Image (tube, coloured by chain):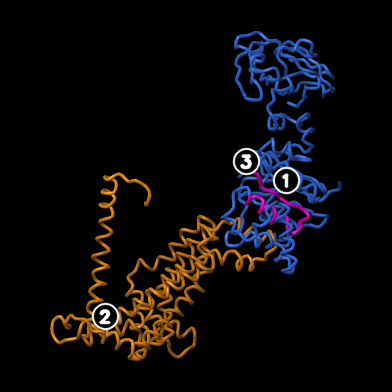
Amino acid sequence: MTGLLGISGLTVRYGTTVALDRLDLTVRRDELFVLLGGSGSGKTTLLRAVAGFLRPDAGRILLDDADLSGLPPHTRPVNTMFQSYALFPHMSVAANIGFGLRQRGVARAETSRRVEAMLALVRLEGFGARRPGELSGGQQQRVALARSLAPNPRLLLLDEPLSALDQGLRRDTRAELVRLRRSLGVSFVLVTHDQDEALEMADRVGVMRDGRMAQVGTPAELYESPADRFVAGFLGAANILPCVVDGRSIVLPTLGVTVRAARPGVAGSGLLGLRAERLRIGGEGLVNQIDGVVAESAYAGDALAVSVRLADGSVLRVRRPLIDGLGAAMVEPGTKVRVGWQPEACMLLPE
Amino acid sequence: MTGTRVEPWRTHSRAWVLAVPVAWLVLLLGAPLAIVLLIAFATPADGVPPYILGFSLDNLWVVLSDPLYREALLRSLRVAGVSTFVCLVMGYPMALAIARAAPRWQNPLLLAVMLPFWTGFLMRINAWIGLLADDGLIVRALGVSHLLYTDAAMYIGIVYTYLPFMVLPLYARLSRLDPALTEAAADLGAPPWRVFLRVILPLSLPGVAAGAALVFVPAIGEYVIPALLGGPQAQLIGKVLWEEFFANRDWPTASSVAVLLLAVLVIVPGAVLRMVRRNGGDRSGA
């Protein structure tokens, strides 16, 4: 698990806007690293800088300790899977997959052997003679993956690889992509704006904001202990309350309530993050409790989304599971309720 | 439209909408073509009009058998072919450069390509007479003895005139090429020249065919430029046609030449198009 890709001080400017701002990042060998961020966060710019499609204004990109910064894309031992797939429409599927091998001087016979192997890998045996235009979106996606993997890159960059697929197919493809990567042992850097995708697929996630890395960690680290309010809100919905921290005891001054956290925080004023699905309505018996009135409740399929108005007028969003059925979970607006949670649910964030 | 039921009022209004272009085509394309065909089969005569209608294959036979016409046609084919090729070699890099330029530069550059059309065609060719004259700038700069009234001058004139017709369809095609395709080729290890040969060029072939047809077709019948810039020995099919009509007043022979020329103009681009299609140009998508 040593570093494969090392990025330091990477800066990219488009005119006066800064797309990447002195960014540092290490991607390890044999991992699936997900770059997560909203539009304009710089995640695609970072990917394009590593692929060589744009020249950074400052900083270094090291792959296995060799500096890539000055190299044109066709000499980099890195391949890209494009969001639009960018399959060559005038070539057969086999010629598409074999393109990278032929460019690297692999003999014709060896190329066609590898192409067959790649077709088998993505379960498209027998499709070699077709044109990309004759395939479905899901099949094209697999051809694009096979094409980018065929030259055996040391690092594969995937730009929103699942965004063009429909919901059901996307879910299956996530798991398949992870399985495929494990079996090949190639490192993936995958760009997405979809937090579910990031949490489900990644070995590690880097959350990007304004051209910088807001936080890097495993999905569990990011979700359970986000570094700040932005990360807490970007990965899953979180209630944010102002608080004053004193060791493990947390005072909520606007509510006049003191609650307990599992781990001590930095003393002083801060923010308390509470995830909606870690809160329980009717939480008598739990360590932390707040009283409120149901303001709204909406059916959300896998849960009941309940808004509880607190004494200070702020609203706490709670997701009530439907394990005992919808009828048992239903609460009418206006009902007085007690919301409870365990100390482990407290996320202490800086202001 | 087969297999779908169309309400009567719809077909009627559609017929009326189509009536204008159909009438235009019948009046201005079909009718003249029919008249030319009719005259091609007529017999020459002294009088007004200078022919007697009938069905005679003599004129067509003369045009096909007399080496004068055959050589003029072959020479015209060669001139048009060479001009098309030179336009392609010069126009392709221009079109590619414009398509790759920053978006705010593309329209000014396209305008520059089309700018010559703002001035009259004859005026521009006359300007070339001055430029190519023995005491003109170009002859002195190149250090040659003379250029005007040679094949070289004729080619310069034709290429100059028709270059925009090559650049514009090529630009239209190249500007729509997905940049991700060239990036993907580079990403897979292709150096820039192979990105061009394997991806850009094959996908631009429909544009090449369109541009070549737009240059080749008018160039083959070109009469004015060879007459003004070319040498007196240059017997091109356009000039032969002109002389049969106006100098010899032999309308049936002139019409036969016109029919022959038209046949060549339909067959050659047709063959080129078919070749491009067979090479998969039509499957390359938008």
On the image, numbered disc 3 is attached to which residue?
A39
x and y percentages locating residue A207 in the rendered image: 72, 38
x and y percentages locating residue B118 in the rendered image: 35, 66
Residue B255 badge: 2
Marks 2 and 3 sit apart, C-alpha to C-alpha, by 67 Å
Q: Secondary structure at mark 2?
A: helix
- Tell whether A156 sits left or right of A300: right
| Amino acid type at image mark 1 | Leu
Mark 2–mark 1 CB contact (< 8 Å):
no
Q: Report the magenta residues as a range.
A: A139-163
Mark 2–mark 3 CB contact (< 8 Å):
no
The crowd level at tag 2 (other Cα within 10 Å; few <14, some 14-19, many 20+) is many
Marks 3 and 1 sit apart, C-alpha to C-alpha, by 23 Å
Q: Nearer the viewer, mark 3 or mark 1?
A: 1
- Tell whether A326 sits left or right of B57: right
- Could you say which quadrant of the image residue B212 lies in? bottom left
